[in-house]
Structure formats: C-alpha cells, structure tokens
Amino acid sequence: MGETALHDLSFALLDWYDRHARAMPWRVSPADRKAGIAPDPYAIWLSEVMLQQTTVAAVRDYHRKFTALWPSVRDLAAADDAAVMAAWAGLGYYARARNLLKCARVVVADHGATFPRDHATLLTLPGIGPYTAAAIAAIAFDAPETVVDGNVERVMARMFDIHTPLPAAKPELTGRARALTPQHRAGDYAQAVMDLGATICTPRNPACGICPWRAPCAARIAGTATDLPRKTPKKKTPTRYGIAYVARRADGAMLLETRPESGLLGGMLGWPCSDWADDPAPAPPINADWTAVEAQARHTFTHFHLHLQIMLAHVPLDAQPDRGHFIARQDFSPAALPTAMRKVYDLVADLVQND
C-alpha cells in the first residue's frame, strides 16, 4: 500500500472520528481541539495509568473521583499515600497506584509539575512504559507517536489480514500502525484507531458494514475478520490457596494489616493472611479461638486464581496482635479494601456487624 493510500486511510478515519468520537472525562473532543482547547496532560496521564489492563467503563468514575479529590499533579503529589490507595481500591493492579504517586512526585520535584512532552523523557518516569509514553505524547501533545493497544492490534491484523499469532505478531502490527500514523492530528488519530476497535472492529461480530475502512480491509475481503487476531493459546491459570484471618475486638474494631510495599496488593490494607501457596501454613495474627467460615473467598489475579479460607475470631479489648493493628469501628470502611479483601469481608459481614 503506497504512501498516498495510507494518507487517505488516515484522513478517512479522522473524518469518521470527527463525527463519532466517544465522550470521555479526560478527552478533548475533535471540535474543541480544532477550536484551540488543549488536553490536560495530567488528566491524560491519569487516564492512561488507570486504563492499563482495565476497561474504559471501569475507569470513568475512578478518573472523575481522582480529579475531584486531586485536581492537579501537585495535589496528587502532596496526597496521603493511604488516601490514594483507598481511592484506588477496586480498580485492581495496585502497583499502578504506588507508581502513580511516585510519578506525580517526580513530575513535581524534577519537572516543575509539568509533564515532559517527549517519549524518551516520559519513559524515565515511574510506572510509564513504551505504550503509556507513546499515548501521553500523542494524545496530550500531538506528537506523531505510534500508540498500539489491543484494539489497535485487532484493527491492524484485520486491515492487513495478518495471521501470525500474538504476541509474535506485535512487531509487524506495530509497523503497520506506524506507517498509518499521520504527522498532523496524531493525538486524534491515536484515539480514532482505538475507538474504531472498541466500537466497530470489535472482537466478536465486527460491524464491517459501517466501518470507514471497509473497502480496503484485507480480512473482510478474505472473509477472515472474525478469526483475527490469532493468539497463541494461554497456559492454564494456576490456583493458589491462603488463609485470611478476620478478628473483631469487643468494641467493634477490626484487625487489619498494611501489606508489604512489594508484591500483590502492596501498601494496601487487608486482612492478615497466611502465605498464598499450594499448601499454606497457618499464620494467625493474634492468639484467639479461631472458627472456620464455611464459604471461601475467590479472586482472580492476572497470573493465578486465589482461594482464601476464612478464619473468624472475636477477641477482648485487651487483645494484643502479633502483627497488624486494630481499626476503630467508625474508621473501618470496607470500600477502602482491595477487591480480594472486600470479598472476604462480604462473606463475614453478617457475623461481625451486629455483635
């Protein structure tokens, strides 16, 4: 496909985007961008970190909440760690929240609270990899960077009928996407391809009849669109087991611990637990008469399933834990727990609320 044809494709997609762009809390519409309204780099960065391995539908409300609580990168950098982690609860992948704070503080301390404009400098910030750096540079600053997420990979695989399975196909798909990225309106173009994949070139039942790239789409012509992109079969997800200990003090206080900074749920409040393994060893955090709860809490992380046996105990006012700390009844908020830990609470809530 020649350079002129590629330019025509990009122009056709931008024309479609001008009429069909999705509204998002962090997005500046095509009409507003043409009127001279620039995107807020802080809002774009925040959205891109939140969108890592998370859907747009899940992120919208979190983005609104964060920008209401911390309207600027200076506000976020000055925020209390625990408050940010609590606001993030339920969004998952908690290392992102820790990196969010680290990045905000670096931007304030080293860059005068102004986000770098170029891909190379963005890559030096905590929690920002090649994709996120490209997305911020393109969407916030209109730099002609190639932004390739799962939607873009699917669009490219179908547009050029590429049957090499992912992840081996990534270099070829990125090359195709790079050839289509225009020098002008690169930010709108990056969002247009993602919108195309999210709304028309969907994984199942793509709406080829209304696609702005329908005519030249090689997979549509070949009848292979629904087969693409191909993916290498995933290995079976393993299951780990653990024991979660829920202790309620006589005054209603709950025993919780802050998990280590490194590892899953790092820095988050949670129930004291055993290790998570094939055969976890009991590790009660306080001397008590523990009773097993019949139901198990089950949660799926990226690389494994977790099944938590729940042990419940009621302890006196003078009970001293070996680890963790008691949080007063009025200060305890189940909503501030990460999802895996909130599932534990949901299974014992009736047993601990009204004693």
Image: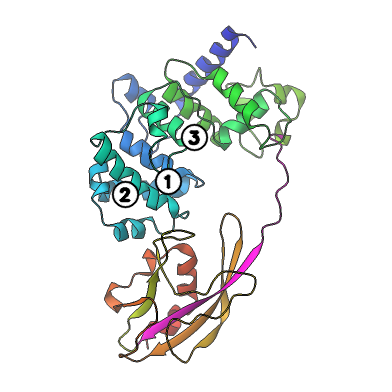
**How many C-alpha atoms fall within 10 Å of the one at disc 1: few (<14), some, or many (≥20)?**
many
- Magenta stretch? 228-249
Mark number displayed over residue 66: 2
Question: Gap between marks 1 and 2, in whole Å?
Answer: 11 Å
Local secondary structure at mark 1: helix
Mark in the foreground, 3 or 1: 3
Answer with the quarter of the image where residue 196 lies.
Answer: top right
According to the picture, the residue beneath numbered tag 1 turns out to be: 50
The quarter of the image holding the C terminus is bottom left
Give the mark nearest the N terminus, 2 or 3.
2
Amino acid at the residue labelled 3: Tyr
According to the picture, the residue beneath numbered tag 3 turns out to be: 131
Amino acid at the residue labelled 1: Met
Q: Are marks 1 and 2 in contact (CB under 8 Å)?
A: yes
User: For this rendering, which residue is in front, 36 or 131?
Assistant: 131
Mark number displayed over residue 240: none
Question: Gap between marks 2 and 3, in whole Å?
Answer: 22 Å
Query: Residue 191, how many percent across, how many down?
Result: 46, 29
Amino acid at the residue labelled 2: Phe
Relative to residue 191, is residue 26 depicted above or below? below
Local secondary structure at mark 2: helix
Query: Is residue 260 visible from the viewing direction of this image?
Result: yes
Relative to residue 85, is residue 44 depicted above or below? above
Query: Residue 141, how many percent across, how many down?
Result: 36, 25
**How many C-alpha atoms fall within 10 Å of the one at disc 2: few (<14), some, or many (≥20)?**
some
**How many C-alpha atoms fall within 10 Å of the one at disc 3: few (<14), some, or many (≥20)?**
some
The quarter of the image holding the N terminus is top right
Q: Residue at x 44, y 73 (%)?
A: 271
Question: Gap between marks 3 and 1, in whole Å?
Answer: 13 Å
